[in-house]
Image (cartoon, rainbow, N blue to C red):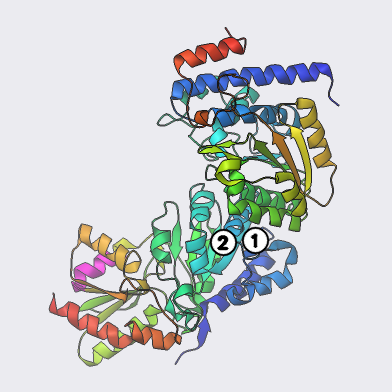
């Protein structure tokens, strides 16, 4: 197995580097700096770190004001509290005015684990995708997260980046590059295409390996950028393989499964199976137990691939 | 203290801005009359006496910032911006029309001189706190002013921001609450009482000044006191009259979101000495 690193750890490390490079980088948190990994930045740059306390609405508003004052704010909390509790602040104070605010939400998805369904965001990508002006990213691993954070800092405008709590296998090289709006082909294939995001991309690669042993050739595309979405890459794969399985640690409503179906339905309708939370909240358990319970493993992706092949 | 000449100038300015507000609201047929008229004296004091700003250079980095947290008083803000020279007066007649840069609520990306987008209550004060932090970080001497409604005080976010402003000792921040006592559904005291406002902010560690929000001398004194206060943000509780300046609009919640009819406009302008 490759090196395991949590995307939130890569975020914390990259923030520190950015802080050293650019004095306009400021960081906000809402009493979760140890968990979101902004604590390292807070320690090295106390004057540029603002702990809002347990007050996410005000944190987002302050981030917007700091942006209006010329700073580049990164605001972090758990995904449920960012996209959920502070939704309207993100809408009115960040997305509507196109503020240069980066919302970096950690603890996305069910692999939050033991804290249970109250803390497991399964709808944040859908909520954020629906906002005009908002860019939505969900990187797969440590190196890609580092590159995505750098890309976000370099790009003007509001961005929502979803990261995870748990350690995930490294897929991308240490010097990964990141282009907002681009998908990546990780494995070529002709019989079907896995389109995955976040930690499900590693599982899609594992599923493709299993299918190869059965002489089924699965393409694997990774979409860290849910919005803007690389419809060119997705449509090409749909045309060439004529069957698609989407995979995300999120509700099948409104996230990657949503954007893929919306895109294909308009230009290249082919059979699609969506793997994700089937309109359910999570519950307590270990991350791995929950991925198994809700059907988000490589074995489940193999089953979905077999189903979609039947529908070709 | 301000001298009589300046006092008369500000009063005349406010009178003509009231005329502009009523005219634009009559033309638009929708918008917020009562809260624009209660706030216009505070805005007049800010835009024509207090704020360091340059209408020929709206993006001047050293400018003072103004945030209209009660964004529904946009007509009052637009009247000030036009009179200050940010855009032509004729534009005021396009308020709320398709394609106009004068949106129903302030839009920083459309209207010259508007620093942040507001309209959803409670959010402007957080942005003002962020602006004040940015000014301090950047070493700018700029001050940030934010005007809130008293009904707006019911938003929990206001109190989150109030904690933060005091926590960060933002003496470059001055908030004003336009305490006209009315909100859409009736008296603020009846809908959800927020009194006593001054003591609440004192308890939140703010410097608090209570004034008559239609008294320019008192307002200027309050702004001076705010600027001289170190280590604390200032809250100016400005007692105002909703619909101020037009007797048949005054103290009426029913004129919160209602515009003057042609007949009402005529009578209002007569009253304001604008034949």
CB under 8 Å between callouts 2 and 1? Answer: yes
Where residue B232 appears, x then y in whole percent? 80, 50
- Front-most of residues B167 and B34: B34
Where residue A256 appears, x then y in whole percent? 34, 68
User: In the image, are marks 2 and 1 on the same chain?
Assistant: yes
- Front-most of residues B4 and B89: B4
Q: Earlier in the sequence, mark 2 or mark 1?
A: 1
Where does label 1 land, which residue?
A: A25
- Identify the subunit bearing mark 1: A
Q: Is residue A149 above or below residue B203?
A: below
Where does label 2 land, which residue?
A: A153
Q: Quadrant of residue A15?
A: bottom right
Residue A309 in sight from this viewpoint: yes
Q: Which residues are magenta?
A: A233-243
- Identify the subunit bearing mark 2: A
Q: Residue at x 70, y 70 (%)?
A: A42
Task: Name the secondary structure under disc 2.
Answer: helix
Q: Quadrant of residue A285?
A: bottom left
- Front-most of residues B19 and A111: B19
Q: Is residue B54 above or below residue A135?
A: above
Q: Residue at x 22, y 81 (%)?
A: A305
Which secondary structure class fits the magenta region best? helix
Tag count in the figure? 2
Residue A227 in sight from this viewpoint: no
Q: Quadrant of residue A101?
A: bottom right
Question: Does A238 appear in magenta?
Answer: yes
Residue at the extreme top of the image, as rendered: B275
Q: Quadrant of the N terminus of chain B?
A: top right
Could you tell me how far apart the alpha carbons at marks 2 and 1 are, in whole angstroms?
8 Å
């Amino acid at each position: 197995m490759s090196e395991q690193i949590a995307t939130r750890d890569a975020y914390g490390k990259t923030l520190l580097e950015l802080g050293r490079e650019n004095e306009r980088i400021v960081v906000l948190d809402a009493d979760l700096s140890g968990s979101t990994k902004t604590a390292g930045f807070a320690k090295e740059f106390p004057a540029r770190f603002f702990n809002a306390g347990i007050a996410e609405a005000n944190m987002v508003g302050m981030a917007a004001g700091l942006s209006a004052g010329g700073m580049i704010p990164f605001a972090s909390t758990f995904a449920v509290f960012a996209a959920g509790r502070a939704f309207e602040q993100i809408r009115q104070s960040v997305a509507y005015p196109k503020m240069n605010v980066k919302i970096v939400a950690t603890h996305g998805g069910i692999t939050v684990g033991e804290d249970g369904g109250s803390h497991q965001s399964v709808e944040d990508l859908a909520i954020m995708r629906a906002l005009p002006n908002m860019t939505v990213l969900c990187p797969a691993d440590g190196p890609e997260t580092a590159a995505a954070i750098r890309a976000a800092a370099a790009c003007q405008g509001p961005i929502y980046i979803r990261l995870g709590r748990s350690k995930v296998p490294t897929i991308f090289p240490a010097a990964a590059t990141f282009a907002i709006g681009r998908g990546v082909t990780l494995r070529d294939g002709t019989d079907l295409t896995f389109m995955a995001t976040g930690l499900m991309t590693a599982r899609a690669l594992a599923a493709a390996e299993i299918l190869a042993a059965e002489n089924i050739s699965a393409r694997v595309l990774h979409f860290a950028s849910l919005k803007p979405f690389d419809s060119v890459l997705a449509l090409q794969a749909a045309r060439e393989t004529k069957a698609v399985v989407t995979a995300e640690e999120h509700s099948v409503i409104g996230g990657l499964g949503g954007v893929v179906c919306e895109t294909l339905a308009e230009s290249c309708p082919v059979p699609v199976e969506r793997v994700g939370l089937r309109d359910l909240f999570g519950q307590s358990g270990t991350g791995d137990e929950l991925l198994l319970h809700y059907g988000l493993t490589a074995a489940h992706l193999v089953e979905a691939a077999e189903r979609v092949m039947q529908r070709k | 203290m301000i001298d009589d000449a300046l006092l008369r100038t500000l009063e005349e300015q406010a009178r003509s801005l009231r005329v502009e507000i009523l005219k634009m609201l009559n033309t638009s047929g929708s918008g917020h009359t009562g809260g624009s008229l209660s706030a216009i004296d505070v805005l007049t004091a800010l835009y024509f006496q207090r704020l360091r700003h340059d209408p020929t250079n709206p993006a001047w980095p050293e400018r003072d910032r103004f945030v209209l947290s009660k964004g529904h008083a946009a007509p009052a803000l637009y009247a000030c911006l036009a009179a200050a020279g940010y855009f032509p007066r004729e534009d005021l007649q396009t308020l709320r029309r398709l394609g106009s840069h004068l949106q129903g609520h302030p839009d920083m990306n459309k209207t010259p001189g508007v620093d942040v987008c507001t309209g959803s209550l409670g959010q402007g004060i957080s942005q003002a706190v962020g602006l004040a932090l940015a000014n301090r970080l950047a070493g700018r001497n700029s001050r940030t002013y934010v005007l809130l409604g008293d009904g707006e005080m019911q938003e929990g976010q206001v109190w989150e921001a109030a904690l933060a402003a005091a926590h960060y000792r933002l003496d470059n921040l001055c908030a004003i609450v336009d305490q006209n006592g009315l909100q859409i559904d009736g008296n603020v005291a009846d809908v959800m009482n927020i009194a006593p406002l001054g003591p609440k902010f004192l308890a939140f560690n703010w410097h608090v000044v209570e004034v008559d929000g239609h008294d320019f001398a008192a307002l200027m004194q309050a702004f001076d006191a705010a600027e001289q206060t170190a280590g604390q943000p200032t809250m100016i509780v400005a007692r105002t009259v909703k619909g101020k300046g037009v007797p048949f609009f005054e103290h009426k919640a029913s004129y919160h979101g209602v515009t003057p009819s042609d007949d009402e406009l005529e009578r209002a302008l007569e009253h304001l000495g604008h034949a």
